[in-house]
Each structure stands twice: as C-alpha cells, then as structure tokens.
Image (spheres, helix red, strand yellow):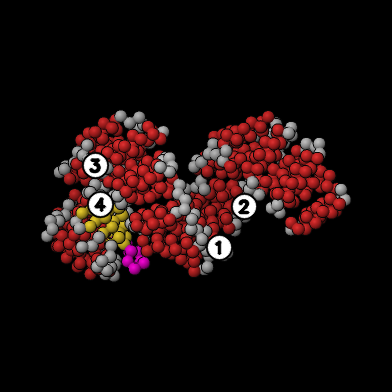
Amino acid sequence: MTCISLIKQSHTLLSLKTVHASILRTHLHLNLFLCTNLIAHYASLGSTSHAYTLFSAFSSSSSSSDVFLWNVMIRGFVDNGLYHKAIALYSNMWELGTQPDHFTFPFVLKACGYVCDDRLGVKLHGDVIQCGCASDLFVGNSLIGLYGKFGQVETARKVFDKMPDRNVVSWSSMIGAYSQSGCFKHGWFLFSMMLNESIRPNRAAILNVMACVSRENQADEVCGVVAANGLDLDRSVQNAAMQMYARCRRIDVARGFFDKISDKDLVSWASMIEAYVQVDLPLEALELFKEMRVQGILPDLVALLSVIRACSNLASFQQARLIHGHAIRCFFKNHIALETSIVDLYVKCGSLVYARRVFDEMRERNIISWSTMISGYGMHGHGREAVNLFNQMKALTKPDHIAFLSVLSACSHGGLIAEGWDCFNSMSRDFHVTPRPEHYACMVDLLGRSGRLKEAFEFIERMPVRPDAGVWGSLLGACRIYSNIELAEIAARQLFELDGENPGRYVLMSNIYASSGKQKDADKIRDLMKQRGVRKVAGHTSIEIKNKVYTFVAGDKSHTQTDLIYSELEKVINRIGKEGYKPDLNFALHDVEEEMKEKMLYAHSEKLAIVFGLLNSGPESVIRIKKNLRVCGDCHTASKLISKVTGREIVMRDAHRFHHFKGGACSCGDYW
C-alpha cells in the first residue's frame, strides 16, 4: 500500500518517475496492480508515451490478458484526447483475444463520438450486445450520448426505452440527444416525464432542457425546478438561462440574470451578447461588447462570432472595421471560421473590396469560404465576378449544394441566363449534386427576370420535387415586374397555403392588384391578412454617421434635426421631380386621400435616412443605409434619381440584396 500511496501523491512527472524507479529496483514492477496504477497516473499527468511504454512492456512480458490493464490504457488515451489511438488499442485488444467488459465500452464509445465515425458506432453497439453488456447502465448511457452526437435520435430512444435501469444521466443524455437533433418538443416532454417520475434533475439535465425551451411559461417552469434543486447560483445554469429567455423574446429577464451574476466569466458576457443577437438588438450587443473590453476581458472565438453577427445585422461598416481589428489583436488571424465570418461581415456591410481582401489573404479556404464570397458578389449584383470565382473554386475543390446555390443566386441577381443554366445543368451531370427546391427557385427567378413567365411556370410543373414557398415566391416576384395577374394568382394561392404567416406575400399580391387598377381585389387581400391575424412588419431604415447608428421609421419626427431633414427632403423631392419623378401611390396606404398618400410616400424611412446622410456626411462619401424589409418601388425610383441629381453614390441593403445607386441607375437592373 505504501507504493500505491506514493504513486497517488506524485503530482509531477519527475516525482512519479522517481517512484517508478524505486519500484523497478525492488522488482515490484511485475505486480499487475502496481503496474496499472502507474499507467493510470502517467496518463493523468499527460504522459501517455510513458504510460503506453509501460503498458506494452507489461502486456508483452506477461501472459496475463487482464482486461483491467487494457481498460486503464484505453481510458488514458481517451482522457488525453487521443481518440484514434484508443480505438486502435481496442481493436488490438480483440485481436489478441482479450474480450472487453462493461468498463471498456464507455471509454471506446466516447472516443467514437469524438471521431464522428457512425459506422464504427454501429459496430461497437454490436460488440456491446455480443459481450453481454447491453443491459449495463453506464454502457447504455454512453450509447445514448453516441447516437445523440450522430443525430440518430430514434436509435438513441430505442436504447433508452430498452434499458432495465435508468439514472439521472440516462434521462439527461436522452434529453440532450433530442436537443442536439432539434427535437425540442420531445426533449421538453421527456423532461416533464422525468419530473413526473420524481427523478431529481442534475445540472446537465437542466442545461439540456433549457436548450429545448422557446416558450416563456416553460422557461419559468424550468427556473422553478432550478431553484427547488439549489442550482440557481450555478453560473453555467445562469448563462444558459439568458439564452433560454432570449429565445422566448424576454430579453429583459435574460439581462436580469446577467446583472445578478457577481463573478461574470467570459461565457457570461458571450451568452448575453448572443442573447441580444438572437432578438435582433445588435446595438445593445455591440455596446455590451464594448463594456466587456473596457473591463479588460479578451473575447474568445465564440464571443467574436456573436459580435460579428450583431455587426452584420447592423450593416455598420465602421463597426466591421473595429471588430476586424479586435480579431487580429486577439490572435485569431488565420482561423478559417472567423475569417469566413469577417468576409461575410464586409459583404453585408456593403464593402466587397474589404471582403475580397480578407478572402485573398486567407491561408486556407473551405467550401463555405468560397460560397460566402461568391454569394457576396451575387448580393451586390456582380454576377460575372461570382461565376468567375465559382470556376476558380471548381479547379480546386468539388462544389456542394451550398456553392451551387450561391452561384445560381448570383446568376439570378445578375441576369446571367446562359451561365445560370450551365451551372444548374452541371449539378447532377458533372458533380452528382441533386438540385433542391432552393436551386429550382433560383432558376424560376432567372427565367422570370427575362420575362419568360410561362416558361418559368412550366419549369415549376416539371419539378421532380414539390415546389416550396421559395419557388412560388420567385414566380410571384416576377409577376409583379411584368404585371402577370393570372400567374400571380396561381402563385399567391400556393403561398397563402405554404407560407400563410408571411405578411410579405399578401402585401406583394395586394400591390400587384393595385398597380393593375384592381383596387377591390387588393383590398380583399388586405382583409384576408386581417382575418388570418397576419400583421405587416414595421419598416425601418438605419444609417451610420460618425460611428453612431441612427434609425428612421416612416414619418419619423423624433430626431433632433427633424426640421432640417424635412426641409432638405422637400428640396430633394423638387429636384428629382424635375428629372421625371412621380410618386407611385401603389406603395402608400390605400385608405387615405391622394394628397396624403403623396406626403406619406415622401416620408418613407429610406428617403429620410438618405436625406439625413446628405446633410451629415462629406460630399464625396458613399451613403450607406439598411432597410429591414424589401425596398418599396417608389423609394427605389427616388433613390436612383437622388443619386443622379446629387452626384452621390447610395448603397442600400434591403432584406433581399444590395442596391448600388449611382448616376441615376441601380445595380439590380430594377429587378429585386
């Protein structure tokens, strides 16, 4: 027992080697119990090389096939992240005639989960049954966790249901499997069953079920269970609660949890930033990030990715430059996921120049990196550049469905019909990529752009998969441009069934009727919206001036420069009127007088933001604005003419794409 005590008291590799040397001198190294303790302790100190050398020497010099010895070494590899070595040793164990036991499998199954080999997982499950370990509690829990990682939640549930005994880990693992697979209702239901069976949830079960919650009453119930089980002061639980309440749209409650944490760690800050991002409050997310940096806390990759998403939502070019600087200073340069996110950030902030610069400087690129840059060119209307980059990518790597979607979307935005067909036809023919509904939607949009609406409809009818809302939406958008009411009605009927909660579908159909002089039909669509309880999302436009973001709504008079803005707006409207601008009353509310319609159109948020930019930025600078919805036709026309009469370039990001207004023209070719 003295030797065992000395081994356990060795806290450094040097002290353990000293004890090992003493054991060798006394010839006790041939003792199996001492040997396995030495192997385990070498591994616990991170020296798997010493552990394996000792294991190899003992197993080769002894006729013993003791499974405990193998288990200790396999565990040593797993605990040190050497999963492939653990699996190889397990295979060697079988080859040398040593049968694994119920202690072996939890470690090997864990290794299999980390190497993401689902075929090996199935084989291991077969080995479990062959060795008579299927009824073991710990093996069963490991199998649930393994199948959960593989997304095979039904198989995990079969294992769970067949277990003769279950503990809290069994329930927690199964709830976690549901959470990882996006089966949130099943996860919540299982948690309720767990409580009904009077099983006290552990921390892992609470964290797993919190990821399944999206309704406030459920969140409150979970918090009640947390408090009842004394987990309310657990920081990881508090961090998870922030994101849970954010999903429930209760950001105030989430912030309350954050403020109550006295010893906030990096995860706390990152969780609250992500919570703001989830509820589309990018300004608050960026403000919290600034506060975090003031307190001297360096962001990790997770925090930076959340901040990048916030900045992307805000479309703030200046903030993008600052965040990029943080990423470089935090030594995240050459991290492929982060650099790809920064490329996407610059794209969404309206700067293809910076996006391409980051892309070109990347040491490594994956399919997502290429697709992001290709998609960026498409969003900005640079279809040919997107196709050229796609061709470069094909020479280096095989495109997947995401890459094809990026280039087809770019062809659609750029009106490149021949190139679009070439890419679409090459999917299955050359790369064995089966087109999905979203690829078909791009082709419908491409045909619609050129006015070939009948051909687009026939293309939809020939689709081998059921057309989704994206496909019919593309057709409806084309019908708006070319005033094809007959096909618009067919598309709208499908959309009201497939995407009945989307207000944009109703508004678009109503505008098609109104522009064709069918006001009664337009009113019927508006009435249908009311009957179904569908509400139009309020539009707003934001602009960044001197590192500060300003947001406008239609008719906004809350700004300190309101009088100056409206005075300048009147002058601008007069100037573009001389260039032929006439307000398109189809984009105003229908239940007001004509004169009032004009005044309302003049005060749309896009126009207010542009005029504010004219007043508060240099005469040579680009005006960058972001609209949360699709830009209305009247504002699109006005923006083109404003760019002409003022000589200013206007870059507008709406919910669909970018519009670059310059010299009286738009990069979208008036199709968006």
Which of the two labelled residues, at mark 2 and mark 3, occupies the earlier sequence position? Answer: 2
Against 567, residue 249 (above or below) is above
In depth, the one of 193 and 40 nearer the eye is 40
Please name the amino acid that badge 2 sits on. Answer: Asn
Does the segment drawn in magenta span residue 550? yes
Closer to the chain start, of discs 1 and 2, is 2
Which callout, 1 or 4, points to the residue nearer the camera? 4
Q: Judge from the rendering whether residue 69 lies leftward or rightward of residue 571; answer left or right.
A: right
Q: Which mark is residue 667?
A: 4
Secondary element at image label 2: loop
Residue 250 in picture, x, y percent from top left:
45, 55
The disc, 1 or 3, on the residue closer to the chain's N-terminal end is 1
Q: Where does the image place residue 57, in percent across and percent down from the top left?
A: 77, 43
Query: Which one is nearer the viewer's eye here, 340 or 155?
Result: 340
Tag 1 residue: 264
Q: Is residue 407 above or below residue 47?
A: above
User: What x and y, as percent, mark residue 425?
Assistant: 33, 34
The residue at which mark 3 appears reads as 449
Magenta includes 307?
no
Q: Assign a secondary structure to mark 4.
A: loop
Query: Label 1 sits on what residue type?
Result: Lys
**Residue density around tag 4, few if under 14, some if 14–19, many if 20 or more, within 10 Å:** some
Label 2: few (<14), some or many (≥20) within 10 Å? few
Whether residue 525 is visible here, answered yes or no, is no
**Residue 397 image label:** none
